Amino acid sequence: MQKQKRENFSSKLGIILATAGSALGLGNIYRFPCEAGANGGGAFLIVYLIIALVIGTSLMTTEFIIGRRAKANPIGAFRKLRSGPFWPFVGILGVLCAFLILAFYTTVAGWTLGYLGKSVAGHFSGQDLPQIQQQFTSFTNHPWLPLVCQLVFLALTALVVARGVKNGIERYSKILMPLLLVIMVILCVKSLTLSGAHDGLKFFFNPDFSKLNASVLINALGQSFFSLSIGMGCLITYGSYISKEDNLLSSATSVTLADTLVAILAGIIIFPAAFTFGIQPEAGASLAFTTLPMVFQQMTGGYFFCLIFFLLLVIATLTSTISLLEVIVAALTEELHLSRPAAAIYSSIATALIGIPATLSFRNGSILNLGGHSLFDLLDHITASYFMPIGGLLIVLFAGWWMKKPDTMDELTNGGTLSLPIRRAVYFIIRYIAPVAIIVIFVSQMLK
Ligand code: PFF
């Protein structure tokens, strides 16, 4: 049996960029506005911020701790740190979750590629709202185009992962992520000058607490886990590539802040525009894909901005699909001793087998779409509302109660060299606050 050599990120910036690359993606620009729109705007935002900043940062740090301590994929990591059959099973659930997310994520990833093509061809110029909405419907209902885009996206992902994470991700993320931030700020400025800006901002920032209920809580929890790539072992895998000197808590905090900032920017772009053009905030999947082209229409140099935006969105999405496939590939190479390229090819084929029906389920009248509930929605719902919260709960319980405290603290403080009080507080969150919060939210949803 061949022993695989483990990779390492080359610098502190490398981890932050790679993790940010995983975190920033469709979850921020497509899914966050969709969820905020469907869950009452401001009230959702507040709950989301609390969960992301408190539980999200702690859980991200926890995944890094487990990964770096064990230097293994999620399945192997649990096995190394604690004997018995149960904990590796949590790793298996995580890998399964990555696989299910990748299947439906590549559906929307394919759309971004299609929309990049549309922006190159100038399909949005001079179009009014009904025409832009019609473009979304005809693209998602097209007999083969969304499937080709999805498969091309999956193939690109497999190509990068087959070559290895370090070469694959670090290099691309360095310039492109900051560039995405710049273009989003420009789009915000434009959106804020639109006539519906006041109403859009009111919807997004002014919390109406009467809208708060168990569904909003679980949706905010699921969205924060989805957006931060936590609760399924993705960051255990990345943690295993982090070197001993790096500061896990500060890296996790930087990534959480950047990810939250991008989600808020997406809201500031989308809601003012939606209120200006008369698009329902609850529009769902089409929200970002109809609102954004309408904003570009209003801008001087809209063609250029649209093109750059969709190009950057494709890349941000690619760094997320890479991280999802990496979870599966790391598990297959280490647990089943497959070569990287073979693992990347097999897992992409398996992903396509579920991903293709997910894409087809978007078509009007599809048999995979029962009463408005598509296979796509089902995959999205079970991963964000069940797999990730349960996975996240088990991960914090493991680090807080089953791992030896000196081991956890050793990783948190880099062998006692980093400041202790704040890390004690994080340990307290990992041990008590995060598990209780996740259980309360999860149970309140079940009892609803
Ligand atoms: N965080 C990514 C996004 O916001 O688009 C999606 C994602 C990537 C979820 C990796 C989970 C994951 F493991």
Image: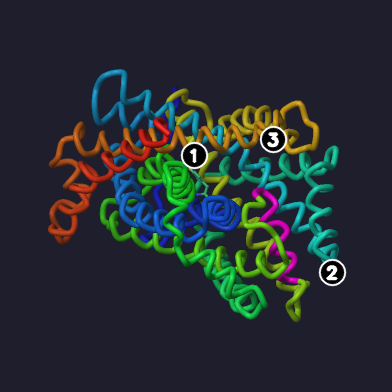
Residue under the image location 19 percent in, 34 percent down: 401
Query: What's the mark number on residue 372?
Result: 3
Q: Label 2 to label 1, Cα distance in Å?
A: 36 Å
User: Which residues make up the magenta segment?
Assistant: 284-296
Q: Does the magenta stretch include residue 328?
A: no
Q: Main secondary structure of the magenta part?
A: helix
Relative to 315, residue 351 above or below: above
Relative to 15, residue 76 above or below: above
Q: Is residue 285 magenta?
A: yes
Q: What residue type is labelled 1?
A: Ala
Mark positioned earlier in the residue sequence (3 or 2): 2
Task: Tell me the mark number nearer the camera, choosing from 3 and 2.
Answer: 3
Q: Is residue 229 visible?
A: no
Relative placement, left or right, of 363 versus 332 is right
Pointers 2 and 1 in contact (C-beta within 8 Å):
no
- The foreground one among 80 and 111 is 111
Relative placement, left or right, of 377 versus 332 is right
- The foreground one among 396 and 95 is 396
How crowded pointer 2 is (Cα within 10 Å; few <14, some 14-19, many 20+) is rated as some
Q: Can residue 292 be seen in this view?
A: yes
Label 2's element?
A: loop
- Residue 87 percent across, percent down from the top left: 31, 25
What residue would you read off at disc 2?
125
Query: What's the mark number on residue 384?
Result: 1
Disc 2 C-beta below 8 A from ligand 1? no
Mark positioned earlier in the residue sequence (1 or 3): 3
Quarter of the C terminus within the rendering = top left
Q: Which amino acid does label 2 sit on?
A: Ser
The colour style of the image is: rainbow
Q: In which quarter of the image is residue 394?
A: top left
Q: Label 1 to label 3, Cα distance in Å?
A: 19 Å
Task: Tell me the mark number nearer the camera, choosing from 1 and 3.
Answer: 3
